[in-house]
Image (tube, grey):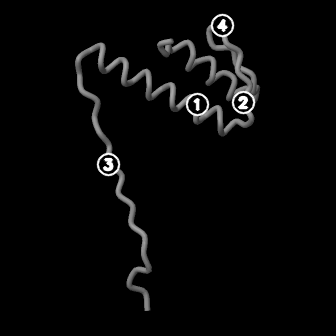
Amino acid sequence: MPVTQTDIDALNTAIASGERRVTLGSQSITYYSIAEMIQARNDLMQQKAIADAKASGTPQRRRTLLYQSGRGYDN
């Protein structure tokens, strides 16, 4: 099932209202928390962006995240 903007809008509306039950198409989904809903919405947005990029023929930009952890130079 392709992701539509309507699906993303339904999740955004549910997040804004605090409702945990969302109907996407013919499926009804109950989420455990708002954080899970936000994660699902972000995943749907990423899937839609990839599908839109493939449809338009433009390559998707890659993002590289660099993490640094250590003690530093504090004495």
Q: CA gap, disc 3 to disc 1?
A: 22 Å
User: Which residue position holds label 1?
Assistant: 40
Label 1 neighbour load within 10 Å: few <14, some 14-19, many 20+: some
Check the image and report above or below for 13 versus 75. Answer: above
Label 3 neighbour load within 10 Å: few <14, some 14-19, many 20+: few
Mark before the other along the chain sequence, 3 or 4: 4
Mark before the other along the chain sequence, 1 or 2: 2
Give left or right: position of 58 versus 5: left
- Residue 56: image x %, image y %? 27, 14
- Circles 1 and 2 in contact, beta carbons < 8 Å: yes
Q: Residue at x 75, y 22 (%)?
A: 21
Q: CA gap, disc 2 to disc 3?
A: 30 Å
Q: Nearer the viewer, residue 1 or 21?
A: 1
Q: Dot 4: what SS?
A: loop
Image quadrant holding the C terminus, namely bottom left
Q: CA gap, disc 4 to disc 1?
A: 17 Å
Q: CA gap, disc 4 to disc 2?
A: 16 Å
Mark carried by residue 31: 2
Mark before the other along the chain sequence, 3 or 1: 1
Mark carried by residue 26: 4
Name which residue type carries label 4: Ser
Q: Residue at x 31, y 21 (%)?
A: 53
Q: Dot 2: what SS?
A: loop
Check the image and report above or below for 72 versus 23. Answer: below
Q: Residue at x 63, y 13 (%)?
A: 24
Check the image and report above or below for 15 versus 75. Answer: above
Nearest to the eye among marks 3 and 4: give it. Answer: 4
Q: Dot 1: what SS?
A: helix
Res 27 → quadrant: top right
- Residue 42: image x %, image y %? 52, 32
User: Which residue position holds label 3?
Assistant: 64
Res 67 → quadrant: bottom left
